[in-house]
Image: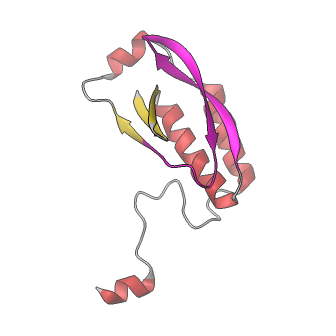
Amino acid sequence: MRELHYGSGVVTVSFDVCAAVFDYTVALANAGVTDRITVPVLADGRRGFSNLLLGPTTQLYCTAIPGVTDDVADEVDIDDFALVESLKNKIAELGEGNGPISASDRYLEPLEHDAELD
């Protein structure tokens, strides 16, 4: 499980959903478009759903949940393989990787003129 920090709130989602939402948000930002998606979340110990509006100005990040192991994640199924595949397809349609950043970037390389300043 991961915490998906969105706006001023936090929702608990599966690792795969968190990664797919993050990657899709990057692709939307690169394409300059917005979309609304519904993701499964852990709410009061049960599976629930949350709507997210994602686009070029969306600020989100994912973090591990301190003290929560994968064993806890097995108690409540918040995975959604169909959603993850759907987001991967949407990313491909948007041409992910053609924009200024890629979701697979682990960090951003300095621009050439920044490197010269070092």
| Vertical comparison of 118 with 95: above or below | below
Q: Reply yes or no: does residue 37 show up in magenta.
A: yes
Residue at image x 40%, y 61%?
A: 107
| Vertical comparison of 21 with 57: above or below | above
Q: Quadrant of the N terminus?
A: top left
Residue 62 lies, in percent from the top left, at 42, 40
| Vertical comparison of 102 with 50: above or below | below
Seen from the viewer's position, the closer of residues 97 and 44 is 44
In this rendering, would 38 be left or right of 112? Answer: right
Q: How many marks?
A: 0
Residue 33 lies, in percent from the top left, at 71, 53
| Vertical comparison of 13 with 62: above or below | above
**Looking at the image, which residue sits at the far left?**
67
Magenta region, mostly helix, strand or loop? Answer: strand
Residue at image x 24%, y 24%?
A: 67
Chain part drawn in magenta:
34-61
In this rendering, would 115 be left or right of 103? Answer: left
Residue 17 lies, in percent from the top left, at 53, 32
Residue at image x 59%, y 20%?
A: 49
**Looking at the image, which residue sits at the far right?**
93
Residue 63 lies, in percent from the top left, at 36, 38
Residue at image x 66%, y 27%?
A: 82
Q: Reply yes or no: does residue 53 show up in magenta.
A: yes
Seen from the viewer's position, the closer of residues 47 and 83 is 47
Name the colour scheme: secondary structure
Q: Quadrant of the C terminus?
A: bottom left
**Quadrant of residue 101 in the image?**
bottom right
In this rendering, would 60 be left or right of 115? Answer: right
